[in-house]
Every structure is written in structure tokens, then in C-alpha cells.
Amino acid sequence: MPTPAPRRPLHWSWLGRVPYTEAVEMQHAARTALKGGQGPERFLLLEHPHVYTLGRNASAGDVLAGPGWLAAMGVEVAECDRGGQVTYHGPGQLVGYPVVNLSPDRRDIRRYVRDLQEVLIRTLAEYGVAARPGEEQAFIGVWAGEAKIASIGVHLSRWITTHGFALNVSTDLSYFTGIIPCGLHQVSMTSIERLMGKAPSLPEIAAVCARHFGQIFDRELVAAAVSSASEPAAVGAP
């Protein structure tokens, strides 16, 4: 029998709280290094300060909050090149940015989104949350009952991915009232904390999420400390 091909290494990192623009720069640097064969695939896990991000399909009308409210609440507004409309990122939310090459065997964006949904569903199951994928384009993400618990928005460049998902762990859900989340009027947002009465720490659930990502994407996990945007320093497997 032929020897199975070795699994690709995936360098994953829990980065703590990172400003949105800095995280975008980190993704772009990792993507450039990966395209040039100068860096590994990366899975950046973090949380953001308060920010509303507008994807390619968003409009200014998707932000309901006025400038005064945004300033008083300390919410930044940032445009980005991911798919989708507007969403909220903030403390207590696990944000995942995979920078992986889908070539040659996973060049299917629908499969990629389904796989991200499955990563989140398996992660939530470990904390007692029964979740399901949104089946239609407008409902992409992960749902618990009738409420949305995770959003997904991605970008691909020559089959290398950036952006990713946002999972509400202990998020202050009131911030979603300042927008039309993902263009869905009257959508209910939820979190692990709201559903279960408690929530894991973000570093803990980040490690669980990385483990499921490695399993679903058939990657060999390498825990990595980030020494720069493009040069992770390996510190051992989780």
C-alpha cells in the first residue's frame, strides 16, 4: 500500500485582543508569505475591541447607530474585502482567521464554508450547545435554535483564504442592535453564555476550536507564538 502523504502543518495562535486593522495586516502578511512559499499556513484566533465590519455586500444603511452613539460606545467602523454584509466584533467573541491554501484538493468555496460551520458546531457541542449550519446563502453561519451564534465571512485569493468566523462566547449582544447583522432584519443573536449560563475562557475555547479545525481540514497542528506578522515561532503542539 502507498504511504499516506504527510499532513500539512498548521500554525495556530491565540493572540488575545487585537485591533481589527492590525489583524487584517497580519492576515495579509501571512497570505503573502504562504503564496511565496516563505511561511506556513496559519490559524489566527483572537478577539477584537468593539468594531463593526462592512463586507463587500454591505451598505452604510446597515449601520443603524449614529456617529454620537458610536463614539460614546467606542465602536470603530471598518470596511473589508470579505464576503457578506455588516457584523459586530468585540470582547468575549472568538474570532478565527484561517490563512490556508485550499489547493489542490479542497478548491470548493461551498465546501470550505460548510467545513468552517462544522468546526464551530463540533466546538459548541463540547460545551453542551446543539447547533446547526445555516443552509441558505442569506443564513450562512451557525445557529442555535432560532438564534444566530456565529457568523462567517471569507475571502479567497488564488485559493488562499483570509477572514473567517466570529463565535459569540460571552459577547455583549446589545452591540448587535447598532447594525442589521448580516443584512437580516430582526435576527436574534445568542452566545454560549446566554444559552448555558456560563462560558469558557477564550483561550480555552480557542484551543478546542483549533483541534477541530485540524481534524476537519486534515492538518497537523503546531501551536505558535507570533513574533511578527509573518514569522511565527513554534512552541509545541497543543
Image: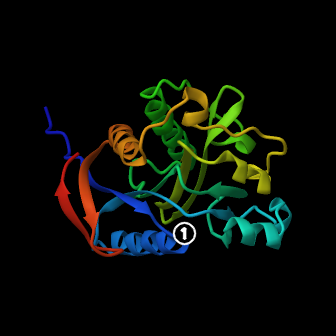
Give the vertical position of 169 relative to 9 (above or below): above
Where residue 124 appears, as percent x and y from the top left, is: 48, 32
**Colour scheme in use:** rainbow
Where residue 200 appears, as percent x and y from the top left, is: 43, 38
Where residue 224 appears, as percent x and y from the top left, is: 25, 59
| Nearest the eye: 133 or 92 | 92
Q: Is residue 234 left or right of residue 197?
A: left
Give the vertical position of 133 relative to 165 (above or below): above
What residue type is disc 1 on? Tyr
Residue 132 appears in view: no
Instruction: Identify which residue is drawn at 54% across, 43% down.
Output: 170
Instruction: Identify which residue is drawn at 60% across, 29% down.
Output: 195
Where residue 69 appears, as percent x and y from the top left, is: 79, 66
Q: Is residue 58 left or right of residue 120?
A: right
Q: Secondary structure at mark 1?
A: helix
Instruction: Identify which residue is drawn at 59% across, 49% down.
Output: 152
Give the vertical position of 197 relative to 215 (above or below): above
Instruction: Identify which residue is drawn at 82% across, 63% down.
Output: 65
| Nearest the eye: 149 or 72 | 72
Residue 27 appears in view: yes
Residue at image mark 1: 20
Q: Quadrant of residue 12?
A: bottom left
